[in-house]
């Protein structure tokens, strides 16, 4: 078994007492190459999306954001994995920087986190 980290008060946080989660669908995925051209043709570019928000014709953008938020869910990470494996997890879109939620396993806070949709955090 691995020892608890030095920063843990009372050294009570160990791999067996914590849970690590990420939230799915936190932002629009950035497309690359041919997929970027297809997405731009279908949805318009990021610039046109921002322009539509600024010009007041944001309903299309808002509807897509609502649909994205409705799909958001918490995914528990395997503690034996790597950060790279988490970053490319199913439906995980990294919103500019990797965000992981570390909580005490089987705690009131973990239950509260799982009962709350990610867009409410």
Image (cartoon, rainbow, N blue to C red):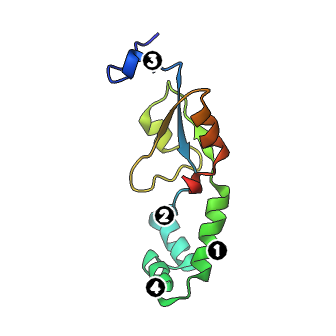
Q: CA distance from mark 2 to mark 1?
A: 20 Å
> In the image, which is nearer the foreground, mark 4 or mark 3?
3
The percent position of residue 23, horizontal first and vertical second, equals 56, 48
Q: Examine the rendered structure and indicate whether residue 91 appears above or below residue 34.
A: above
Q: Which mark is residue 31?
A: 2
Q: For this view, does 50 lie left or right of residue 77? A: left
Q: Which mark is residue 12?
A: 3
Evaluate whether residue 62 shows in this view.
yes
Q: Which mark is residue 54?
A: 4
Q: Earlier in the sequence, mark 2 or mark 3?
A: 3
Q: Examine the rendered structure and indicate whether residue 70 appears above or below residue 6.
A: below
> In the image, which is nearer the foreground, mark 2 or mark 4?
4
Q: Which mark is residue 63?
A: 1
> In the image, which is nearer the foreground, mark 3 or mark 1?
3
Helix, strand or loop status at disc 4: helix
Say if mark 2 contacts mark 1, CB within 8 Å: no
The percent position of residue 65, horizontal first and vertical second, equals 59, 68
Q: Residue at x 42, y 46 (%)?
A: 98
């Amino acid at each position: 078994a691995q020892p608890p980290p030095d920063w843990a008060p009372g050294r009570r946080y160990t791999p067996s007492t914590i849970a690590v989660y990420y939230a799915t669908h936190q932002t629009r995925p950035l497309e690359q190459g041919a997929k970027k051209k297809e997405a731009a043709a279908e949805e318009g570019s990021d610039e046109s999306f921002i322009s539509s928000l600024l010009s007041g014709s944001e309903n299309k953008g808002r509807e897509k954001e609502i649909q994205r938020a409705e799909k958001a869910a918490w995914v528990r990470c395997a503690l034996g994995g790597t950060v790279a494996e988490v970053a490319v997890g199913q439906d995980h879109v990294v919103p500019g920087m990797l965000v992981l939620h570390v909580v005490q396993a089987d705690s009131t806070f973990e239950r509260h986190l799982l009962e709350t949709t990610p867009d409410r955090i």
